[in-house]
Amino acid sequence: MPSSRVLGYAARAVGQPLEQFAFKPPKLGEHDIRVSVTHCGLCHTDIHAIDDYYGITAYPFVPGHEIVGYVSDVGGAVSDLKEGDRVGIGWQGRSCMKCEWCLQGEEQLCLDIVDSGTWVPFGGFSSSVFVDSRFAYPLPDAMRSEVAAVLMCAGIAVYSPLRSYANRSAQKIGIIGVGGLGHLALQFAHALDYDVTAISSSEEKKQQALAFGADHFIASDDKVSLRQAQFDFDLLLCTASGKINWEPLLNILKKNGELVVVGFPDVSFNSTDLVAHQLSITGSFLGNRTTMREMLSFAQEHGIMPKMELMPMSEVNKAIRKVKENKARYRIVLFNDIADTDR
Ligand SMILES: [Zn+2]
Ligand SMILES: [Zn+2]
């Protein structure tokens, strides 16, 4: 019999520190599973959501969407997972399965996306989570749980756009930002055989960027190098957030080149180059279920290795402070030190 109470950490109101929180497990739908959480990564999106940056947060709010754990209960129609299976779960925990996007296999664009998050009803900073089994992914046996946790959001977010450009003619690409997303993007881009340049505001990240797989490094305030790189790049993948000086960066894209945004940077620039060079700017949101499975086996095969720190889940507020102060190198994964209870 699964336990009757789940423990988690919830924000009770906008921007509040997380507090211990107990809730009754929801009734499993026929495709749903209950997963006993062993690890959950802390993503900047969790912190944004605590602060209601997206305007969709319902309180009490339990964050956490880079989840690894073991299946502990299954709904009646679940056939491909059973109790005891180890799975990874990302930001998306379900979808409507019937809108035009779901029918095309692009579930990450589901029209019900707000209600499809793993945060609903409560996310991964808990002893158990409840999701549609079709959004839980069996993990390669040899992959460590903390590694898989990071890949469930940060990994898919950068792999999906890089993979789709590998099918086209892009060869020379620039990764803007060497952080939680960027350090994975460099590894995936290298493994996909691109000619990869890391572009970062901090020169001191050069050696690390090269170690992650960058072939070249440009400091974003190095005007000379940026001028020399004019019309050099097929693709720029922006993994950074916050303020960016866009004009010198757009100038290094080839004509017809493309900027893909996966971070949440401020976007504002003079549109002259955009028009005159026929540039495209697109966003990319996570990935679909097929790409998720492919990403996990690609990451295992190519030894993609997030750089991370492990902390106990009971120190979640300390972990949040560290990310807010930009001191995490580069991701934090919480291992669970709370369990379901009957009391
Ligand atoms: Zn995330
Ligand atoms: Zn849908």
Image (cartoon, rainbow, N blue to C red):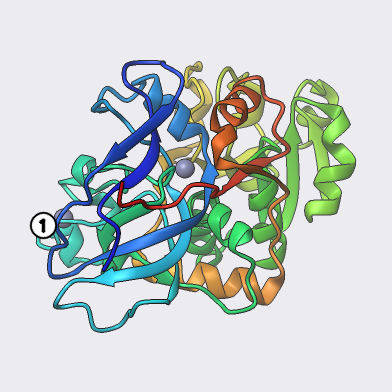
At 31% across and 17% down in the image, what residue appears? 13
Q: Is residue 152 left or right of residue 150?
A: left
For the point 37% across and 43% down, which residue is it?
7
Q: Nearer the viewer, residue 305 or 133?
A: 133
Note whether residue 171 is visible: no
Residue picked out by circle 1: 99
Q: Can see residue 74?
A: yes
Judge left or right: residue 287 versus residue 300. left
Residue at 9 percent of width and 62 percent of height: 98
Confirm if mark 1 falls within 8 A of ligand 2: yes
Give how far across and how far down residue 21 sits, in percent: 35, 33
Rendered image quadrant of residue 229: top right
Question: Mark 1 Cα within 10 Å, few/some/many (few <14, many 20+)?
Answer: some
Q: Quadrant of residue 27?
A: bottom left
Give the residue displayed 69% in from the left and 72% down from the top. 302
Residue 163, horizontal then vertical, whole percent: 52, 63
Q: Is residue 81 above or below residue 231?
A: below
* Image spot of residue 49 (x, y percent): 38, 28
Q: Is residue 243 above or below residue 299?
A: above
Residue extending furthest front?
Answer: 343
Whether residue 239 is situated above or below residue 339 in the rendered picture? above
Image coordinates for residue 171, horizontal then vertical, percent: 65, 59
Secondary element at tag 1: loop
**Residue 170 versus residue 278: which sits nearer the camera?**
170
Q: Amino acid at mark 1?
A: Cys
